[in-house]
Image (cartoon, coloured by chain):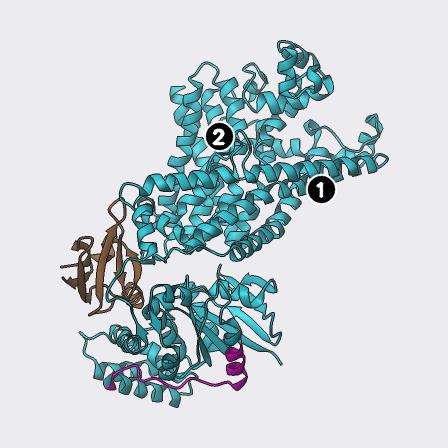
Amino acid sequence: MTLKEMKPGQSGQVLSIGESGPLKRRIMDMGITPGVAVKVIKMAPLGDPIEINVRGYELSLRKEEAARIEVQV
Amino acid sequence: MSYTIALAGNPNCGKTTLFNELTGSRQRVGNWPGVTVDKKEGICKKDKELHITDLPGTYSLSPYSAEEIIARDYLVKEKPDAVIDIVDGTSIERNLYLTLQILETGVPTVIALNMMDEVEARGDEIKAEKLSRILDVPVVPITARSGKGIGELLAQAAETARGKKTPQKLLVFDEKLQRVIDEVEKELESSGESDSAWKAVKLLENDENIAAGISEELKNRIRKIIGKAYGSNEDPEAIIADQRYRYIAKVVKDTVKKSAAGHIETKSDKLDKILTNRILALPVFACIMYLLFACTNSENFLFLGIPSPGIWLAGLVESVWGGLTGVIEGLLGNASPWVYSLVIDGIMAGLGSILGFIPLVLVLYLLISFLEDCGYMARIAFVLDRIFRRFGLSGRSFIPLLQGFGCSVPAVMATRTLESEKDRKITAILAGFMPCGAKLPIFALFVSTLFADSNQTLVTYSVYIFSIVTAILVSLLLNKFVYKDGASNFIMELPQYRVPTLKSVFIHGWEKVKGFAVKAGTVIFVSTVLIWFLSGFNLDSFNGKNAAENEDGSIMCEMNDSFMASVGNVIAPVFKPLGFGEWRPAVGVVTGWIAKENVVVTFAQLYEEDVTEEYLEEYFSRFTSEELEELGFEGGAYDSEAAGDIYSESVLFEGGDENALPHMKDDIKTKAAAYAYMVFNLLCMPCFAAVGAMKRELKTWKETGKAVGIQMATAYAAALLVNVVGGLFL
């Protein structure tokens, strides 16, 4: 499944990042690399973007970007 | 001998606090060449030999944003004597990612382990000595906000800078990757490239900036080396990031002792449960925005019947300035009339209009600095992103646009908080479209006189709606056709909430106010004096005719005969398709650029045949003495000297006289034309003060000119549409 499909409170492990180019580098620079543990904290009040906890800090990203990140729950 | 020390670190790692702590007030803010990113430099207050440069906050040294390119270019090309890498101890993993990249550049490095107070409060422990041994650089635990550990940090930094101790290469990558990197490095070295070790890693990371700097032939050889080691389905770029983080995870495991495993709820998380709560987020946000607005622009602060701190301070400054003007008026008693007018109506009025804005800007900036430093600004973007994304903006654009309803000057300046340059440019343009306080008198006058038989409230509201719809459409168009480039993703850290230090909020605020006063001030001053000249002089001023005709021997003339009238005549035909192609409305548009409320004042002067002494006396005769006093007549007695000013500012501004200026109807004949005139003034170039602010934020005259051009084109197109389409119905 993808990070987008995870529910608030759910934890998982990143398998792969389907992006390419600068966006992929940005995602990885921010600490989302294969194998890392992520936890979805919440959705924004209007449903998008989402807030996740990764490597001990909070990161927000749009669902559109989260849909390209494969995770294992 | 002086040494340069660069401060590098993630955004929100306390870099600015440390910079202020090290340099005190001895700092200089400029720009990095070519980009709109602040360049801050200062001399260390404790050790004058140390020159400190504050690099932009970045998460990595990839060429992803302007900030990152600046930071890496500075480290690699300018080679500071040392870099202090500030690491936020509360999110050490992500922070060390930048650290590894800084170490790769080979610049002597000292790590400042910041936020140690929070680390301790969480019950965690970071073994600084062990970390120092592993990374082979000094590591100094500090708490920048309280100043703890800074003396030690400074001593280490000075020693490192003087000793030029380059960090040892770390074994971050696995054998295979390191072998490929070494091969590429050798290839670069043999071609005479500098910084070959660093460039080798960057080339494997697929870094276009570095690749562009080497020859095609060398690139091909390197491509072959990489291609031999990694197949087409493998991605060295991802492998490098992955291995860096793997290395960090190992380091962290050895040096950090967490009080609890996994994600534990911090105070900040608890606060976030309210501030970004599904139901509460928007109401809480509305309250905070209302407070921000109330503190800066409100005449009725929190319904207490007193003006807001911003307005109160502005009033104070204005009355002091008024007093000073009075004193100077007295001193100029014997000066020739034009000198008197230059000093009072030109210079003093010009400077006064700048000074009047400073308190608003100051209060706004203190509040915005606070919201930014405490971490709430990122939440605003998080909450509103969904809405603003549709219009091609980001959630952060909201604050500048909201401020625009009060005053365009702070609105334009608030665009500073936007991360992407594209958003900043578009928002600065849109902020000028908002119906600011000074535009309201125009609407009041027009609605009361030319829409006397319509639903006036509805007409006024429709102007507001018009401005918002225009802003949305223009934003979409600009995104599609003008500012096409620029990142449109939303991968953003939500930093921990922190109470900012008063000192840092004040330094932040003061810096910006100073920038405004100097940069915007020049624009406002020069243009005010220019318009003063155009409105008060004509050719006869210089051949003695005016001096002979005027009773007081003044060489100046009435506005009706001035250069300004000629300017009005020249540009009037341009406005013909908009329905108001006459010289007087045209002059109104021009004087509106000094300050939008001038449009109404100018009308009262230009249609002088409608504002005769007899008319005023008859008009004011309907009021009782109390009402007259309320309108501004001293002691409630009618005074023909003061009547003109009171008529324009207390009556016309409020739309109080529906029979006002009947001759205006000769120039602006239809309702469609009247609405087009309101729309044009709403959307066209804002006042010079706002243009000055735009110049400050957009940095170059070229960009500022482009932005104003877009505003003018929008105003013209919208007014044309209103006049043509409206003409069919009204």
**Residue, x 37% and y 66% (percent of image)?**
B119
Q: Chain of mark 1?
A: B
The foreground one among B284 and A48 is B284
Which chain is assigned cyan?
Answer: B
Q: Is residue B710 left or right of residue A12?
A: right
For label 1, the crowd category at 10 Å Cα-Cα, with few meaning under 14, some 14 to 19 and many 20 or more, is some
The foreground one among B692 and B301 is B301
The foreground one among B271 and B428 is B271
Q: Secondary structure at mark 2?
A: helix
Q: Which residue is mark 2?
A: B303
Q: Which residue is mark 1?
A: B347
What color was chain A assigned in the picture?
brown
Residue B215, percent across and down? 38, 80
**Residue, x 46% and y 49% (percent of image)?**
B415
Q: Is residue B139 left or right of residue B489?
A: right
Residue furthest right in the image: B334
Does the magenta segment cover residue A1?
A: no
Disc 2 marks a residue whose amino acid type is Phe
Which of label 1 and label 2 is nearer to you?
Answer: 2
For label 2, the crowd category at 10 Å Cα-Cα, with few meaning under 14, some 14 to 19 and many 20 or more, is few
Q: Is residue B348 left or right of residue B16?
A: right
Q: Secondary structure at mark 1?
A: helix
In the displayed structure, would residue B143 be above or below residue B284? Answer: below
CA distance separating discs 1 and 2: 36 Å
Report the span colored magenta.
B155-175
Does the magenta segment cover residue B172?
A: yes
**Residue, x 70% and y 38% (percent of image)?**
B320
